Image (spheres, coloured by chain):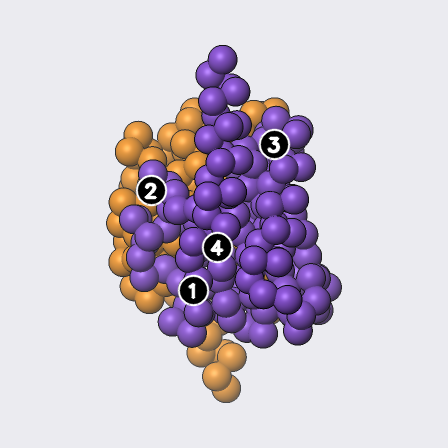
Chain colours: A purple, B orange
């Protein structure tokens, strides 16, 4: 299984979010070639700004593992994490972060480029077009 | 009720955290002179790096209000928020942030000074000595 495979799984989560009117961002956490958490953005459904896909995926993965740290895990998320999520990814000492589309407006790279844990490996741009298209179509439909 | 009064309430929450072996950080959310949420750090108890006092307070306050945004609220927290919490405080469009002790190592001011919402009013240093003392005593006891 390569990064594209797991990003496709994150994309399936993002689609679920979009179908329920949520900004379509999805995430999965992979540990030893196994997906141990899947989540999508639920901020509207839960009336909770903290319910981003990554936050829920981190919480769920830690629960599955029985430990707070995800140093042996990879987090796949369809869109570049925001500052909040980058902070959580850092606290979890996540081993690897893979994201699809960049988020120039709200992404951590703009506001907190040093926010991640120094040991976190970062891979950018995996299936970026598909990830970005989901977002573009969602917001285009909203403006109609 | 002034900022010191509400910070004392946050300090009570921080003490609760310390008593259960959690890093002693506490928070309250105030809306129209009423405390609508109280929370303390529960990262160890919940095995969840996202369970900072501020995160829980924001989630609880939004639940009480029935809306995601805390633009008419003030968040009081005993220690300077980290990057993750600053991001959440921004997403919630929090009207006012009041914190006690600064956190030079992990605080948002170092890593993401622009992370907050531009409309959020920030007040620093309220009961800073008491807030810092709780932290110092906790870590000193841990090292014994």
Badge 3 or badge 1: first in the primary sequence: 3
Tell me if mark 2 has few (under 14), some (14-19) or many (20+) residues whose alpha carbon lies within 10 angstroms of its own: few
Residue displayed at 51% across by 79% down: B142
Helix, strand or loop under label 4: loop
> Dot 3 corresponds to which residue?
A18
Q: CA distance from mark 4 to mark 3?
A: 20 Å
> Dot 4 corresponds to which residue?
A126
- Same-chain status of marks 1 and 4: yes
Badge 3 or badge 2: first in the primary sequence: 3
Is the N terminus of chain B in the top left, top right, bottom left or bottom right quadrant?
top left
Residue displayed at 27% across by 58% down: B110
Tell me if mark 3 has few (under 14), some (14-19) or many (20+) residues whose alpha carbon lies within 10 angstroms of its own: many
In the picture, measured across the screen, residue B53 lies left or right of residue A122, that is right
Q: CA distance from mark 3 to mark 1?
A: 26 Å
What percent of the width, then of the height, locates residue B86?
39, 47
> Dot 1 corresponds to which residue?
A122
Q: Is residue A56 visible?
A: no
Badge 2 or badge 1: first in the primary sequence: 2
């Amino acid at each position: 299984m390569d990064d594209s495979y797991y990003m496709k799984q994150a994309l399936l989560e993002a689609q679920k979010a979009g179908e329920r009117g949520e900004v379509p961002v999805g995430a999965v956490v992979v540990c030893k070639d196994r997906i141990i958490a899947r989540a999508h953005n639920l901020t509207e459904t839960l009336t909770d700004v903290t319910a981003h896909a990554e936050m829920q995926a981190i919480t769920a993965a830690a629960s599955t593992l029985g430990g707070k740290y995800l140093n042996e895990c990879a987090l796949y998320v369809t869109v570049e994490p925001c500052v909040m999520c980058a902070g959580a990814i850092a606290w979890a000492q996540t081993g690897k972060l893979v994201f699809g589309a960049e988020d120039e407006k709200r992404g951590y790279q703009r506001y907190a480029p040093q926010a991640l844990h120094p040991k976190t490996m970062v891979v950018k741009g995996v299936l970026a077009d598909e990830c970005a298209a989901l977002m573009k179509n969602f917001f285009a439909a909203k403006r109609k």
